[in-house]
Image (cartoon, grey):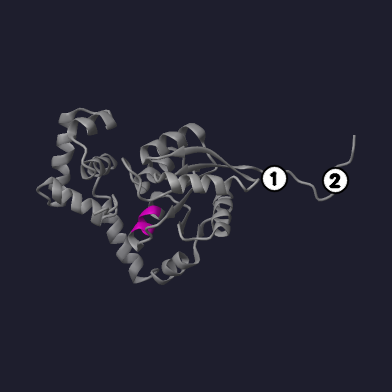
Amino acid sequence: MRPAKRGFCLMKTLTILLAEDHTVVREGLMAFLATAKDLQVVGEATTGREAVALARELHPDVVVMDVAMPKLNGCEATRQIVHADPAAKVLVLSASCADEQVFQMIAAGARGFLEKQSSGRILLQGIREVGRGNPFFSAAISRRLTQMGGASGRQDGRRAGAGRRLTPREQEVLQLVAEGAPNKQIAAELGISAKTVDKHRQQLMAKLGIHDTAGLTRYAISSGTIENNG
């Protein structure tokens, strides 16, 4: 038997699930990540709901998640992924990095958060660190988190508390309503009856003090549940 070469070690390949709804961005990320020998993209998700299903099926080492995902936003998708597997590691990569969204993603279980303006070097570092189980945030977000630790942290607690007023199912219905889906489509998407969808819609309006669908849509945009494409 030949002696092992000194200093030689096997490099573990990190498997990645890429959750990004914009095709050009997703394909660009796929091509870039393919240049790293220790990383392998094993799945692509174009909706938050697809990301949840693929995470449960593939058990990737790292889920790279956008915040603004159709059908189920990145925050709720992250919450469901981590709820199903507490060891799941989610790294957020988003163009939108408002303070509230950063806090919501962390509260949902994300291990790191990067802006899409981050360099490729930082993205690779973030994936590897999160894959090892370490938190990783861009320098700008780290500074903001540090600055907001005191009174702002308490303010964030109030914001997070407000978000938890809605159940996970109500969050799902809210997003689909705001995206313009009719009750029958929402029922088919969630595997519930149209009557149950209408009940959730009424509960949403009662909890939020909103009286019409347009109001629910405005709330979904202001809370970061969906993107404002107008």
Residue beneath disc 2: 5
Foreground residue among 146 and 229: 229
- Residue 83 is covered by the magenta coloring: no
- Which numbered disc, 2 or 1, marks the residue that appears first in the sequence? 2
- The residue under the point 65% across, 45% down is 37
Residue at horizontal 50%, vertical 60%? 118
Q: Amino acid at mark 2?
A: Lys
Q: Which image quadrant for residue 94?
A: bottom left
Residue 52, given in percent of the width and then of the height, sits at 41, 38
Residue drawn at the location 85% of the way across and 45% of the way down: 5
Q: x, y (%) of residue 165?
A: 24, 49
Which labelled disc corresponds to residue 11? 1
Neighbour tally class for label 2: few under 14, some 14-19, many 20 plus, Cα within 10 Å: few
For residue 218, the mark is none
Q: Start and end of the magenta stretch?
A: 101-105
Tag 2 near tag 1, CB within 8 Å = no
Assign the C terminus to one quadrant of the image.
bottom left
Q: Amino acid at mark 1?
A: Met
Q: Crowding at label 1, few (<14), some or many (≥20) Cα neighbours within 10 Å?
A: few
Most common SS among magenta residues = helix
Per the image, label 2 sits on a secondary structure element best described as: loop
Q: CA distance from mark 2 to mark 1?
A: 15 Å
In the image, residue 121 lies at what x, y percent?
58, 58
Image coordinates for residue 168, horizontal then vertical, percent: 29, 42
Compared with 9, 150 (above or below) is below
Direction from residue 214 to residue 95 in the image, left or right:
right
Which secondary structure, mark 1? loop
* Magenta stretch encompasses residue 102: yes
Residue 89 visible to the viewer: no
Residue shown at 39% from the left, 36% from the top: 50
